Amino acid sequence: MKSGNKINPFKTKGYFGDFGGRYVPEMLIPALDELEKAYLDALKDKSFQQEFEHILKTYSGRPTPLYFAENLTKRLKGAKIYLKQEGLGQTGSHKVNNAIGQALLAKRMGKKRLIAETGAGQHGLATATVAAKFGFECEIFMGLTDIKRQRPNVFWMEQLGAKVTPVTTGNMTLKDAVNEALRNWIETLDTTHCLMGSVLSAHPYPVIVRNFQSVIGKEVITQIKQAEGRLPDYLIACVGGGSNSIGLFYPFLDFDNVKMIGVEAGGLGISTGKHSARFAKGKLGMIEGYRSLFLQDKDGRSRETHSVAAGLDYIGIGPEHAYLHSIGRVSYTSATDKEVLEALKLLIKTEGIIPALESSHALVECIKVAPKLGKDKVIVVNVSGRGDKDIFIVAEALKDKEWTEFLRDKIKEADK
């Protein structure tokens, strides 16, 4: 072990090296200060920590399993592969960890309303879920493009009592949903908490979300020691904004013998320009309240992004990820849509596990790395969500005729 990889942004004015900070309209500063104070007070309050841990255990089903993928390991003829099964928690993804924590903070601050941005819908679903549990009014901002491709999550958000507001500006994806959520927050500060879903935006959000998600990595340390008697050699996770990956990586940062790989959305290929790979083609900038790497044109305007996975279709990267890349502690690569679909099919057929398209990006890298390693090596892959939500996208991508006929029949029945 060695120290130096971890930064406490509360002591650096919200910065991780050159990245992060707080670049927001002046009217948002009091709300961010209020949130920071509430969080720091909560850290000192044992009852807050106990309530958070109790809800994670009894409501969300933690700890989630660390599963030895024996069949996949044999298939790839290399390192042992373990899967952290975040999809088996409440709402089907890691997003609920942070949503529970921030809902408790909102209650602590006396807020009556939660708003959130969402791409794949998993964060929106988690926010709507905790809003129902704790009695908050709830509004979810979601790009119209994402609403169309993630209809199952939209349906459940609405059943939970949330208002799902379509965002029709820009590309109508996650970036635009973030902007709309921030605009709404400015108009409703007194009653509303903006429940940011990833390790991005202005300080203190990146550190708060990271700390709530660190339960993932903390559990893996205990679980892998029980299974293997030691720490893993590799950690692999997908990276959109970066919450599931930083949640896995952060507790391991000072174990220098543990290598970490974050996998971005390579879309149709980096050379096509239709991707969401910030480390491959991003530029330093200040967008949506923080300084980091963003996909921008030569004039600094946001570029169009693409990914088969709605949750990775975002122009920016969380500032702590940018910092960890800059110091060489974490490696970042990308996976194409085609590779992702093949990885998804392989895990389904070998292990009977249906991963989310986002998580399947991490599986692509695992499939590449595992055969190159000895059988004494250990890889942990964060399966950050399950694939129920992606059935429409996957069935269309795989050109499943029976599925198409099923949808046509349902449409005919509905029109009668």
Image (tube, rainbow, N blue to C red):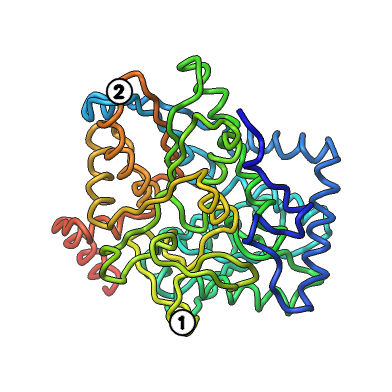
The C terminus - image quarter = bottom left
Quadrant of residue 197 within the rendered picture: bottom right
Residue furthest out toward the left: 401
Q: Which mark is residue 170?
A: 1
Q: Which residue is mark 2?
A: 374
Residue appearing at x 60%, y 32% in the figure? 218
Instruction: Place residue 70 in its image quadrant.
Output: top left
* Residues packed near mark 2 inside 10 Å, few (<14), some (14 to 19) or many (20 plus): few
Please say whether residue 174 is visible from this viewpoint: no
Q: Nearer the viewer, residue 77 or 135?
A: 77
Query: In this image, 248 relative to 107: left or right?
Result: left
Question: Where does the image place residue 90, in percent across and percent down from the top left?
Answer: 54, 42
How many residues crowd mark 1 within 10 Å: few (<14), some (14–19), many (20+)?
few
Q: Which mark is residue 243?
A: none
Asked if residue 370 is positioned above or below residue 280 in the image, the reply reads: above
Residue 305, placed above or below residue 359: below
Q: Residue placed at 53% from the left, 69% from the top?
A: 284
Amino acid type, callout 1: Gly
